[in-house]
């Protein structure tokens, strides 16, 4: 059973809780019982030995704990003769026995269940007569590490938390980070440290996560190091604010044999749980755009009283986003480099704001200034959008280190990995994309080799992509067709630290008198230091950002004085700032092609479009003929019995839809569910059901009564059809392949469920021209709108050739549709060229490349070009 199936099976416990628990409370039962069953299974094989040792040492008057830990082979134990399976043998006393069983865990394990408030949970389940049923359900799930390894168990916990967060309207992304993002970060963290990764080296290192969540980052780092160097020892430290996540993380550390006292509960920013420690490696994914007002007093006090002796010396970001506080917190945890030894490296996930928010002198700018002027930033990697469960925004992995290799000193590497993704089969919240192992390997290689590189796309003559390659700087370009093209874009840039710095200068203009004889003359100061000096006009005051790599006066004379000869710089107001305009370093300007080149391609494409349009009507007629008359022109015919349908092959059966399928109507929104047991499920709408495919990027959810799920749940093979809307939506549909579990459909989408016909042939029939003719004839119509009832759909005439002939017709139709799709691509290319031509005309006119005086672009010029 894979982790998704296992998490779904565990979540099915929710079926027992409906009615007595609100949906938002399911996780409070399921998560602690999952942890309990995991610990229960881990201790199973040593249970007898532990009990015997406990009895012996207790009678001898000795502290049994060290002996029990040794016998258990874990960093925890349980001294109760019970386990979840044995608890089921005494149903009448299960409440007392379960309480005693949990109390018999060693203190570190018992703390986990106290964080879950497990004893209150036992009382409530017992009161609702659910305790035995829930315990029985979990007792039948085998979560032993030999069956579900630690990595899979971690993913199961994360999947359960995600489900819990979704139905509780909480932010799942606050709890954990997608595994492929963690793998990328861990790769970048270790790739430069040969002494750690070399097999046989018995090195000991520490790793820390100040926003540990369920421990996913720490666990993945441990697995990576163990895979490359089994002799290496990685001691894990962490802190977590959320009690449930903390409990799961602590349970995971217990099972791994990690010192559980290293995992601390509490708010990292206001109460540092590891205040005197430094670490070799660190990882973090702090919350994005979350304000830190609750801890503002403590943070400001530390900043003002301790300065650089504390954690927040460089500056404080605005209260609306605390992510840069975690960045500074990690900086304070870096182990010092002594005689070339030691030092730290850490990775942190941030949104785009820390790259550029705040002008010179602001808290954010000062933090960037500190890390760049101290040469701490090794690389920043831009990730694809839609990678995280709770946000689709752009995110970036920052890698910082105080032990840079010699080649990296003074430089920052920027890697644009935003195009390295593949679409997920099923979206999870806002997460619709994932990075493959190949994508991760490419980014890791670019970072490890410390090279600049381009992503080169090979295009054919029609602009269609033929393939992509990552080409290091100076390497040969890939081959391309003689009439093709190469599209080049940088994906790895190496820049000096000072390239990100600038000086903000204040440019003043003189204040002019407005009245009297002095009107129009500059105003001079009359007192103090300003006496006799030009007075600035605040309305004309401006600022300029001068790169640190450029002389300020030279810049001023070149960029300002030609336009404002009376301007001067107020040097007292100058400030140094830093920003990292990530996207600007990867923008590629594509020069406008000449009108002649565009017109030549447009003529070729237009000629092909016209040629294929002549074939289009014939192809559509051929498809319609195949569905109603078959492929053999010599087949004997018979009357179909339907006047408008005419004759059909005599060996075909003619029936009606209601005899080969059922029509399932969907659920209507707005039903009264107050006081009823409900669940939240995915919900297909008309917009999701397109002509021949399903658009599942944005699937809504709806709360329904729990016992209605089976009635409305879509099944694999259902043919979805729209009830109506605009004329082109009437009867539009596609086959449901069970892309989303437990998905239902609204009442404006029919699910036609075949029982005596294949889904493919039924879909072919319902999307055919004759079916569309039938739907329009039976629909209710108003201006530009039409709808059809399920009763009329069930009366649709259905033609049934033998199955082998059905397959041949479907294959023929597939080939014809492919050719129509080619025409569509050509038409889209023609539209693109027309847009490019329009832009070229405008660009040529506004840049003075053509003399448009006394001329006008004649109406119909573009049309003449196409038809030429």
Image (cartoon, rainbow, N blue to C red):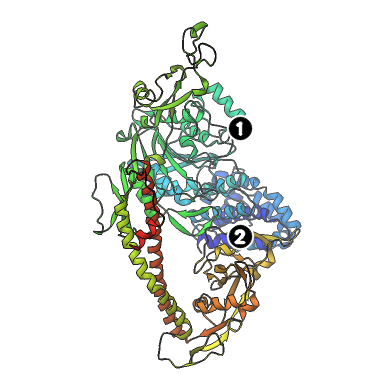
Question: Image quarter for residue 598?
Answer: bottom left
The residues tagged by marks 1 and 2 sit, at their Cα atoms, a distance apart of 36 Å
Tell me if 159 is positioned left or right of 604 in this view: right
Which residue corresponds to mark 1? 295
In the rendered image, the quadrant that contains the C terminus is: bottom left
Between disc 1 and disc 2, whose residue precedes? 2
Specify few, some or many for label 1: CA neighbours under 10 Å numbering under 14, 14-19, or 20 or more.
some
Question: Image quarter for residue 15?
Answer: bottom right
Q: Do we see residue 198 in this rendering?
A: no
Q: Where is residue 25 in the image (x, y as percent from the top left)?
A: 68, 53
What number is the disc on residue 839?
Answer: none
Q: Is residue 455 above or below residue 195?
A: below
Q: Where is residue 817 in the image (x, y as percent from the top left)?
A: 42, 72
Determine the residue positioned at 48% across, 48% down: 219
Q: Is residue 867 above or below residue 810?
A: above
Determine the residue positioned at 62% across, 46% down: 110
Q: Position of residue 376 (x, y in %)?
A: 40, 32
- Depth order, front residue of 56/225: 225
Q: Position of residue 742 (x, y in %)?
A: 59, 65
Q: Do we see residue 220 in this rendering?
A: yes
- Depth order, front residue of 469/624: 624
Determine the residue positioned at 32% across, 61% down: 603
Circle 2: element type: helix
Which residue corresponds to mark 2? 11
Circle 1: element type: helix
- The furthest residue to the front: 854
Q: Is residue 476 above or below residue 88?
A: above
Tell me if 668 is positioned left or right of 493 in this view: right
**Residues tagged 1 and 2 counted as in contact (Cβ below 8 A):** no
């Amino acid at each position: 059973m894979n982790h998704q199936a296992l998490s779904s099976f565990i979540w099915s416990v929710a079926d027992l809780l409906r009615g007595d628990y609100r949906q938002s409370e399911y996780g409070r039962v399921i998560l602690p019982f999952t942890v309990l069953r995991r610990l229960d299974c881990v201790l199973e094989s040593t249970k007898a030995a532990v009990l015997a040792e406990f009895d012996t040492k207790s009678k001898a008057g000795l502290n049994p704990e060290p002996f029990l830990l040794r016998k258990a082979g874990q960093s925890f134990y349980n001294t109760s003769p019970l386990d979840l399976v044995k608890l089921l043998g005494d149903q009448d006393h299960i409440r007392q026995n379960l309480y005693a069983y949990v109390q018999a865990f060693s203190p570190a394990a018992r703390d986990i269940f106290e964080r879950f408030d497990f004893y209150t949970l036992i009382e409530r389940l017992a009161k609702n007569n659910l305790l035995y049923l829930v315990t029985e359900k979990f007792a039948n799930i085998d979560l032993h590490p030999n069956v579900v390894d630690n990595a899979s168990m971690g993913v199961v916990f994360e999947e359960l938390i995600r489900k819990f967060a979704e139905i509780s309207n909480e932010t799942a992304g606050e709890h954990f980070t997608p595994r492929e993002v963690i793998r990328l970060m861990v790769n970048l963290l270790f790739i430069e440290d040969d002494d750690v990764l070399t097999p046989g080296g018995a090195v000991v290192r520490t790793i820390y996560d100040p926003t540990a969540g369920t421990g996913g980052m720490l666990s993945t780092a441990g697995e990576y190091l163990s895979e490359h160097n089994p002799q290496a020892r990685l001691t894990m430290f962490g802190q977590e604010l959320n009690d449930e996540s903390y409990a799961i993380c602590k349970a995971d550390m217990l099972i791994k044999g990690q010192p559980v006292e290293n995992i601390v509960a509490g708010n990292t920013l206001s109460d540092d749980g590891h205040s005197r420690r430094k670490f070799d490696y660190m990882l973090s994914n702090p919350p994005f755009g979350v304000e830190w007002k609750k801890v503002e007093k403590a943070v400001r006090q530390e900043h003002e009283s301790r300065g650089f002796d504390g954690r927040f010396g460089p500056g404080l970001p605005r209260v609306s986003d605390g992510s840069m506080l975690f960045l500074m917190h990690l900086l304070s945890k870096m182990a010092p480099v002594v005689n070339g030894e030691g030092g730290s490296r850490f990775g942190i996930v941030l949104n785009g704001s820390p790259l550029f928010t705040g002008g010179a002198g602001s808290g954010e700018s000062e933090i960037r200034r500190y890390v760049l002027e101290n040469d701490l930033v090794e690389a920043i990697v831009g990730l694809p959008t839609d990678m995280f469960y709770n946000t689709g925004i752009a995110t970036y992995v920052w890698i910082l280190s105080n032990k840079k290799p010699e080649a990296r000193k003074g430089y920052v590497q920027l890697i644009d990995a935003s195009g390295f993704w593949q679409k997920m089969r099923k979206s999870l919240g806002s997460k619709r994309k994932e990075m493959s192992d190949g994508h991760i390997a490419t980014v890791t290689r670019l970072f490890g080799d410390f090279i600049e590189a381009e992503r080169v796309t090979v295009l054919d003559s029609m602009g269609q992509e033929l393939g992509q390659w990552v080409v290091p700087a100076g390497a040969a370009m890939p081959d391309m067709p003689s009439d093709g093209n190469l599209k080049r874009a940088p994906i790895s840039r190496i820049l000096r630290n000072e390239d990100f710095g600038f000086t903000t200068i204040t440019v003043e203009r003189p204040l002019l008198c407005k009245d009297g004889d002095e009107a129009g003359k500059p105003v001079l100061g009359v007192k103090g230091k300003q006496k006799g000096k030009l007075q600035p006009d605040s309305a004309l005051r401006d600022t300029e950002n001068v790169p640190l790599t450029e002389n300020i006066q030279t810049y001023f004379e070149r960029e300002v004085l030609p336009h404002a000869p009376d301007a001067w710089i107020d040097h007292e107001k100058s400030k140094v700032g830093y920003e990292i305009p990530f996207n600007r370093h990867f923008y590629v300007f594509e020069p406008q092609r000449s009108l002649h080149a565009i017109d030549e391609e447009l003529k070729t494409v237009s000629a092909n479009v016209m040629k294929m349009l002549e074939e289009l009507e014939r192809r559509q007629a051929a498809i319609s003929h195949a569905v109603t008359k078959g492929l053999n022109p010599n087949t004997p015919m018979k009357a179909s019995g339907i006047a408008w349908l005419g004759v059909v092959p005599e060996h075909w059966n003619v029936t009606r839809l209601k005899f080969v399928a059922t029509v399932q109507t969907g659920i209507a929104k707005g039903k009264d569910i107050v006081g009823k047991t409900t669940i939240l499920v995915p919900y297909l709408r008309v917009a999701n059901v397109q002509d021949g495919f399903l658009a599942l990027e944005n699937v809504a959810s709806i709360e329904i009564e729990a016992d209605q799920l089976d009635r409305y749940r879509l099944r694999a093979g259902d043919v979805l059809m729209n009830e109506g809307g605009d004329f082109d939506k009437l009867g539009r549909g596609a086959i449901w392949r069970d892309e989303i579990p437990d998905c239902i459909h609204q009442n404006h989408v029919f699910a036609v469920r075949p029982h005596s016909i294949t889904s493919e042939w039924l879909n072919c029939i319902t999307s055919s021209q004759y079916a569309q003719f039938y739907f329009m004839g039976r629909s209710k119509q108003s201006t530009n709108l039409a709808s059809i009832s399920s009763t009329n759909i069930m009366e649709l005439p259905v033609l049934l050739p033998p199955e082998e002939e059905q397959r041949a017709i479907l294959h023929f139709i597939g080939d014809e549709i492919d050719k129509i799709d080619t025409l569509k691509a050509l038409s889209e290319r023609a539209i693109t060229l027309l847009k490019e031509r329009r832009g070229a005309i405008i660009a040529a006119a506004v840049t003075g490349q053509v003399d448009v005086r006394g001329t006008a672009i004649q109406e119909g010029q573009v049309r003449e070009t196409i038809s030429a």
